[in-house]
Image (cartoon, grey):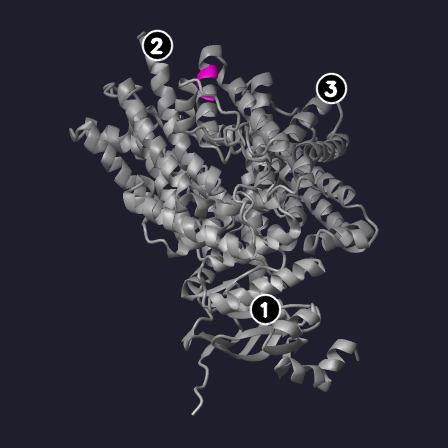
Amino acid sequence: MKEQPKTLLQMNNVTMRFGGVVAVNGVNINLSEGRLAGIIGPNGAGKTTVFNLISGVYDPVEGDIRFRDQVISGKSPSEITHLGIARTFQNIRLFKGLNVFDNVKMATNCRTEYSFMEGVLGLPRVWRQEKESAAEVERYLELVGLLGYENTWPENLAYGLQRKLELARALATKPALLLLDEPAAGLNPTEIRELMDIIRRIHKELDMTILLIEHHMDMVMDICEELWVMNFGKVIANGDPEHIQREPEVLRAYLGS
Amino acid sequence: MNSYLASILIFTGINLISVLGMFLLMGLTGLLSFGQVGFMAIGAYVTAISYMRFGLPFGAGLLLGVGVSLLVGLVIGTVTLKLRNDYFALATYGFAEVIKNVLIYFSGYTGGSMGVFGIPAIVTLPMVIVIFLAALVLCRNFKVSKLGRNSLAIRNDELAAKVMGINTFKQKLLVFLFSAVFGSVAGSLLAFSTYYIEPNMFNWSKSVELIVIVFFGGINSLTGVVFAGMALTLLPEILHFGAEWRMVIYTAIIIVTMIYRPTGLFGRWELSLSQILGWIKGRRKSAVGRGGQGA
Amino acid sequence: MLVQQIINGLSLGSVYALMAVGFALVFSILKFSNFSHGSVIMLSAYLGLWFSNRFDVGLFPTLLVCMIGGGTIAVIIEKIGFKPIRDKNGPLIYLFVSSIAISMFLQYLMTALLGGRFFMYRPLLKSSSWRFAGITIPIVNLAMLAASIVALVFLLYVLYRTTIGIAIRAAATDLSTPNLLGININMLISITFFISGALAGIAGLFLGMSLNVYPQLGGLVLKAFVATVVGGLGSLGGAVIAAFLLGLLETMITAYIGGAVTPMVSFTVMILFLLFKPEGVAGLLGLSSGSATQKL
């Protein structure tokens, strides 16, 4: 008998409203462990809101979200990160006061164990853990191709590199589920190909489940194993890319009606 | 050493200790607080009253002051740190005013607006220097460990900091309490170096002075803040400015800094021990960790 | 006695409302608490004092000069203290720090130049109080109430019936929308500061007339702040209602309990609102949807 893949993330009938506007309307998503999946849909379809709901930036008005069978809706963003979900932002949100190295290193903070008092007293354990984190940071920087930029300030990086830095920062929290919000936005074709390679490597080598939002259809169809299509806050289709491309409702949403 | 100079240096050292607290809170974490002076007042009064009335030794009184400051800080911080940054600032202003009014009102213990007189000058210059250096080391450890990174992340983008797994409320509360300790210790030292204390020494404009120093030196630079603290405390003493003109100049400095160089005079530049050693050995390195500019 | 206190409370509340509306107006479009508003009030009070003495004129010319003067001062402050920070896309807290620094700078500058003395307005009104059915009410309070209400109604007209008013309200939701209406953002911000400063000018004149003129007069802007917070973030209607309530509350407490506790009470009310009803009076009445806590 074939082993069923375990469900990692589950959204049950999730609804989000802002004032009178329904941004997400009864969304059901069932993401299996180990998938590389995507959410697509026209602008304003509610994709980013779905990410904000999963990462705890918003609490859903109705429905619940489960991660490894534990309800996470209602938890704070930092608790959710600690449980193993990391994300990037559509409008890059790097920390301007920290250099490239520290931007990634700060994301390892949630796994360092020393306390506030140990930190200010500078006890040996602090330096040991700082060293371990530093080694990790180098690994992630290498993975995304940012070695050599450690001391640069993020605002001085080229746009494509800023996207990669956000990716490295998200990886540094060591998530089980990685949410990428339009990782290819603003990149040129060469950069997009590089990014696809990096995403594949992360998926394979780090064994991460990845859910991404993207507008570049070639890329989505190429790397994603499963897709959800959203329009007007609702999921209108779900399945593998070939199946999705033939779905009449998807064609209507994209070609306009 | 002549006693006038010594007293100015003691005063400068004490000022620097509370400036360091403000640096962690406002510089690194981005929390503008007018409440720092409130903790100085608590430290000063608790230590002075416990010494004068109950015969508690200075050291024990100082620790007692820290304890009281932590308790008060815990209550104030829990209540106010969830607010928007500017509301937090105003709430801390309210806190400083309340403390001042409490000191005036409960005159049975505090001497009301007359204050507490005849406090012995136990505090010596070496004592202030040692405490200042210890405070400096704690601040440096803070800045280079995950605590500093957490704070800077919160200052720059609180939401992104949360999403990267920082419990921002807890971090802000811990920094608030930690800086309260600095304020309280500075207050205790102040009381035992000036012979008397009165509520007007703890006006909120004192907090503004600390804020000016941090902005002037640079919200990212411990070195800058220490130099700015020395300069802005010593200069008015040497030049004998009147109190009004001193504040006119201070506030003008902050306006000009905010407009032309919001990262402060020193930007991100830090002086490190190895650089100092390098200079002493005459091996000047041309590249001294000078970072870029911008917020 | 009670009627008298209510009228006095309402007239105090009306000045608070003038200050609060000016304060909330700037808050609604630039999203920061502008403490330099207090120095506009203080400087206008000095301006009115100087003008009325120098030219020996009555209330109305002085009022006009205070409004124009206040508006101009507010615009100058904006250009010097805020625009450079806005141009560099500085964080909001910088604007706030700058506003505090400016207000302290002007306060200490006036102290250094003129000393902490209190200056008194010569009588600008014919009689000093009004007796009616056994109650006595200072005329200045009535003039204050009348002028404030006229100014507030006029403001309402501007905001809801003129293009510029509609642009200001649009800017409150999203600072880039006035561009779509073909209005320059910087121009719009200047106009907003001018209106806010003109209201502060009226408040400054009346506060100067009833409390005398001194450098710390601008500290009364804290009342405006409390009213805006209690009123609800950037909600003009909420701020006006809260300002009147605050004026009444303070007058009642001063009359029946004692002036010493009054400042503590208003601050406590504000903190309680921040903690338990952060969306303020406006939230209670369903006027706006803002939040004082930082979820996002």
Residue occupied by mark 3: C54
Q: CA distance from mark 3 to mark 1?
A: 72 Å
Q: Amino acid at mark 1?
A: Leu
Asked whether the residues under the numbered discs 1 and 2 touch, taking CB atoms below 8 Å apart as contact, a structural biologist would say no
Q: Nearer the viewer, residue B175 or C277?
A: B175
To which quarter of the image does residue A80 belong? bottom left
What's the magenta region? B232-236
Measured from the top left, where is residue A133 in percent x and y? 40, 51
The chain under label 1 reads: A
- Residue furthest top in the image: B2
Observer-side mark, 3 or 2, equals 2
Q: Which image quarter holds the C terminus of chain A?
A: bottom right
The label number, if any, that marks residue B122 in the structure image = none
Residue occupied by mark 1: A212
Tell me, yes or no, whether the highlighted magenta stretch contains residue B168.
no
Work out whether A119 lies above or below C160.
above
The chain under label 3 reads: C
Q: CA distance from mark 3 to mark 2?
A: 49 Å
